[in-house]
Structures are given as C-alpha cells and as structure tokens.
Amino acid sequence: MGFQTEFNSVCKFKSEQELYELLEYGRGKMVKKQFRVFPTGQKVIAYAPDNQAVAIVRIVASIAEINFQGEEVTQVEMELIRRLTDEESRIQTALAHEMFFGEQS
C-alpha cells in the first residue's frame, strides 16, 4: 500500500479560482494537462498554487480525455472534507516540500 500513498497523496491546484470554488462551495473541479491518475474515492491533501497545504479533499471523479483542441487533459472533481488547521498546514507543507516540491529555502 505504500506505493498508493506515495503516488496519490498530493492534489495541487494551478488556479486560484479552482481552489476558491472548492473552499467556498465544498465541491470543485480542476483541469490538468496530460493524462493523470487520480483514484476515485481517495482522500488527498490539496495544495494551493504557492505549494501551501490547505485542505483534505476526496476525489469524486477523474476523467482523462483529448479535448477539442487535441490536447490531453484530465478533469478531476472533488469534494471538500475539511480545511487544515494552521499547524496541520505548516506540517503538511514542510513535508510536501521535502517529498514532492523540493526543499524549502
């Protein structure tokens, strides 16, 4: 099970608008370039565009397709489980920098 956790523990938003909609309405969608794997039903940590951990979300749907412009895209629909506390955010952000985004300066 270690592979599943390591591979699918991050859900990073590239758009502030997509993150805002998730936090404001409790459900949201993000679009990623290329085909990606986001397993339905799994809970993951959501990160803001500045790599700050912000919430726990559940992946509701993941659809990989070629859009009308011929680009490979993956649409990920999710629901908000809860926002992280300041301490949880600080710890998860530090871990993510070490494991996924590169070490903090």
Image: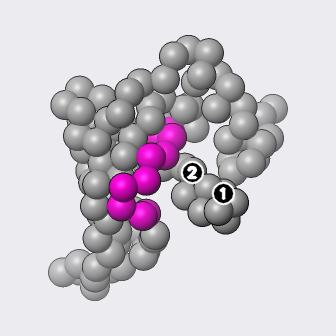
Q: Nearer the viewer, residue 12 or 37?
A: 37
The spot of residue 76 in percent (x, y) is: 32, 58
Q: Secondary structure at mark 1?
A: helix
Furthest residue toward front: 1
The answer to whether mark 1 and mark 2 are in CB contact below 8 A is: yes
Residue at 72 percent across and 37 percent down: it is: 95
Q: Provide the residue designation for mark 1.
A: 6
**Residue drawn at 81 percent across, 32 percent down:** 105
Q: Nearer the viewer, residue 18 or 27?
A: 27
Q: Is residue 16 left or right of residue 100?
A: left
Residue 1 x, y percent position in the rendering:
65, 62
Residue 31 is at least partly visible in this image: no
**CA gap, disc 1 to disc 2?**
6 Å
Magenta-highlighted residues: 38-47
Residue under the point 77% across and 42% down: 98
- The amino acid at mark 1 is Glu
In the image, residue 39 lies in the stretch drawn in magenta: yes
Q: Where is residue 50 drawn, in percent x and y?
A: 54, 35
The residue under label 2 is: 9
* Residue 31 on the magenta segment: no
Q: Nearer the viewer, residue 94 or 85?
A: 85
**Percent position of residue 13, x then y:** 43, 46
